[in-house]
Amino acid sequence: QAHFVESGGGFVQPGGSLKLSCVVAEDIFTIALMGWYRQRPGMQRELVADVGPGGGTDYVADVKGRFTISRDNAKNTVNLQLNNLKPDDTAVYFCNTIPVARLGDSEYWGQGTQVTVSS
């Protein structure tokens, strides 16, 4: 069973919106601090938002006020609403636990979902 299955990415113009979703393996989701990460072209993967088991959230300054993270505990899903998108938000977006899940000695990631913002 895949731990993380992301979806919802696409191509949008600046100022547009997208909603990303991630289905998480149940044994991980129920106790985990969950995060959305992104990897912009030529850059390292970075954490942009997190949500705790009780729903508390935190964001990096770059996305605060534009992105909203949420979790649906009944569906083992963590979502990321992206509003007022900018070209600099172009990236592959991933969900994962905090700290990042590991499989043996390696980090475990899903396939991610591509977000492209361009006019």
Image (cartoon, helix red, strand yellow):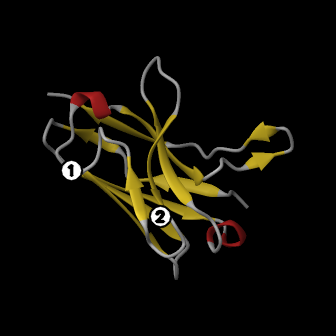
Name the residue beneath numbered marker 1: 83
* Image x and y of residue 86, in percent: 21, 34
Name of the residue lying farthest toward the bottom: 74
- Characterize the local packing of mark 1: few (<14), some (14-19) or many (20 or more) Cα atoms within 10 angstroms: some
CA gap between label 2 and label 1 equals 17 Å
* Image x and y of residue 51, in percent: 47, 62
- Characterize the local packing of mark 2: few (<14), some (14-19) or many (20 or more) Cα atoms within 10 angstroms: many
Q: For the residue marked with disc 2, what is the amino acid?
A: Val
Q: For the residue marked with disc 1, what is the amino acid?
A: Asn
Q: How many marks?
A: 2
Q: Quadrant of the N terminus?
A: bottom right
Name the residue beneath numbered marker 2: 78
Image: 65 above or below 86 = below
Residue situated in front as seen by the camera: 55 or 29 = 55
Per the image, label 2 sits on a secondary structure element best described as strand
Q: Which of the marked residues, 2 or 1, is nearer the chain's N terminus?
A: 2
Splitting the image into 4 quarters, where does residue 119 fall? top left
Name of the residue lying farthest toward the right: 104
Residue situated in front as seen by the camera: 30 or 60 = 60
Horizontal relation, residue 37 to residue 8: left or right: right
State the residue at coordinates (79%, 37%). Answer: 106
Splitting the image into 4 quarters, where does residue 31 fall? bottom right
* Image x and y of residue 99, in percent: 65, 49
Image: 47 above or below 79 = above
Horizontal relation, residue 100 to residue 61: left or right: right
State the residue at coordinates (37%, 46%). Answer: 9
* Image x and y of residue 53, in percent: 54, 72
Horizontal relation, residue 97 to residue 105: left or right: left
Residue situated in front as seen by the camera: 111 or 38 = 38
